[in-house]
Image (tube, rainbow, N blue to C red):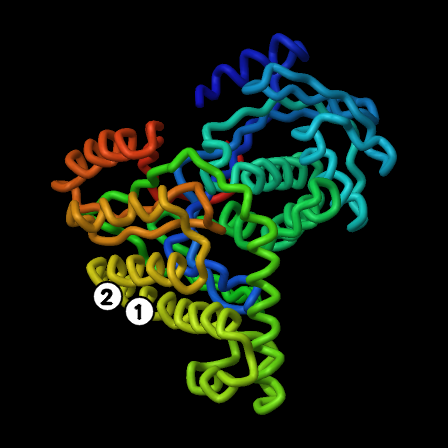
């Protein structure tokens, strides 16, 4: 993303210069479908981000321009001023959530753009919310801390976009740190940085470029499975509120009281929470081979036990294994999107070549490949 394109556009639209801010997309190395079960996730901010230039304009209106779309919007900041354009709802929502928390926000001008790929599971929407949350907070001295800015982004999704997301994406976008992943406890929201310096390896996403429309209904169904099992275990173990609190022995005790499907879903989640902790311990020692093994185990679990994979993802995962890739798994909710791969430098070219040719041969479409590097979170440029 050329920052000077944003600066040129801002100058030509508003005849002045503002201040530029940035907030990144994210990956999640391991820990899938653990968030709503009170478990852990392991995200990191990446070197692809949303950027905005912003300046107060002396009115009570926001004038915004989406450079990538070539579209503009103007809106006030009262609740009934909700703009029609989807992208403008993110900016409006961030402002409204801040106002609800007691902030006074005057009108401002802004131009924004980004290079976080859309629909690839890198959370371009959280990057946009965090970028504006950070920028508006800084511009107008509102005094919100990073934690509150992440929550404001999440509340924007819930209340103005209609997506009932967890906090991971906004959290990673705000708290990202170069050379580190973030072990986030989804229940207490305590976090710690885990070193991630994979010398000799590259982190690469391969996008299937498919999206199977199972995702939403399937997601809700799996959530209900997890809740049903946690409820059954709680009758014997009152301290168990979520699957995070349970272990495999507790699960076996209720095997005859829950459906076979619910049992296997819960088994995946309990195992995945432990896998993430094992992967963190391996990262502390710089043991990337063990991390890779855990990634493959996660993929098998997501594919066979949680059943949220698809032919395209399984094909790419299998190909990674055949090419000697250290670790590979589906990243995100499933049914499409990307695999995340930890690849030794010397195997990279061959793997990418095979991913391109073999995948296109099999499915008739080319995958998209994104190299990612772990970078800092939201900031003023």
Q: Is residue 87 above or below residue 289?
A: above
Image spot of residue 236 (x, y percent): 58, 91
Left or right of residue 2, residue 280 in this image:
left
In the rendered image, which residue does mark 2 sit on? 285
SS label for mark 1 = helix
Location of residue 287 (image quadrant): bottom left
Residue drawn 45% across the image and 85% down it: 252
Image spot of residue 61 (x, y percent): 80, 25
How many marks can you see?
2
Q: What number is the disc on residue 72?
A: none
Q: Nearer the viewer, residue 360 or 40?
A: 360
Q: If the image is split into quadrants, where does the N terminus sit?
A: top left
Q: CA distance from mark 2 to mark 1?
A: 7 Å
Q: Is residue 94 visible?
A: yes
Q: Is residue 314 above or below residue 271?
A: above
Q: Nearer the viewer, residue 345 or 241?
A: 241
Q: Is residue 144 visible?
A: no
Kindly check if marks 2 and 1 are in contact, taking CB atoms under 8 A apart as contact: yes
Residue drawn 59% across the image and 51% down it: 146
Left or right of residue 330, residue 213 in this image:
right
Q: What number is the disc on residue 281?
A: 1
């Amino acid at each position: 993303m050329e920052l000077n394109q944003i600066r040129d556009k801002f100058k030509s639209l508003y005849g002045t210069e503002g201040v530029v801010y940035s907030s990144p997309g994210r990956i999640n190395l391991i820990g899938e479908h653990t968030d709503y079960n009170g478990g852990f996730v392991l995200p990191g901010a990446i070197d692809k981000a949303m950027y905005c230039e912003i300046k107060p304009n002396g009115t009570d209106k926001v004038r915004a321009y989406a450079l990538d779309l070539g579209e503009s919007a103007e809106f006030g900041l009262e609740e009934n001023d909700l703009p029609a354009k989807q992208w403008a709802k993110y900016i409006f929502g961030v402002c409204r959530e801040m106002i609800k928390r007691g902030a006074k926000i005057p009108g401002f001008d802004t131009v924004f753009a980004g290079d976080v790929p859309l629909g690839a599971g890198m959370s371009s929407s959280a990057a946009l919310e965090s970028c504006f949350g950070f920028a508006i907070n800084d511009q107008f001295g509102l005094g919100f801390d990073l934690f509150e800015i992440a929550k404001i982004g999440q509340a924007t999704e819930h209340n103005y976009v209609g997506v009932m997301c967890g906090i991971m994406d906004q959290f990673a976008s705000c708290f990202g740190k170069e050379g580190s992943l973030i072990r986030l406890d989804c229940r207490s929201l305590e976090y710690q940085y885990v070193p991630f310096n994979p010398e000799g390896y590259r982190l690469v996403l391969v996008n299937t470029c498919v999206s199977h429309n199972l995702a939403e209904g399937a997601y809700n169904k799996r959530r209900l499975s997890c809740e049903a099992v946690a409820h059954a275990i709680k009758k014997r173990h009152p301290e168990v509120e979520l699957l995070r609190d349970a272990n495999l022995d507790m699960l076996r005790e209720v095997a005859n009281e829950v459906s076979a499907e619910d049992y296997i879903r819960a088994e995946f989640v309990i195992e995945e929470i432990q896998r993430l902790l094992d992967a963190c311990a391996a990262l502390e020692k710089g043991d990337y081979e063990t991390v890779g093994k855990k990634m493959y185990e996660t993929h098998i679990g997501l594919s066979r036990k949680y059943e949220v994979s698809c032919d395209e993802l399984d094909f790419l995962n299998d190909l990674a294994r055949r090419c000697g890739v250290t670790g590979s798994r589906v990243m995100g909710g499933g049914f499409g999107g990307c695999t995340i791969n930890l690849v030794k430098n010397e195997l990279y070219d061959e793997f990418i070549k095979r991913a391109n040719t073999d995948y296109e041969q099999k499915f008739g479409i080319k995958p998209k490949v994104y190299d990612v590097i772990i970078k800092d979170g939201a900031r003023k440029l």
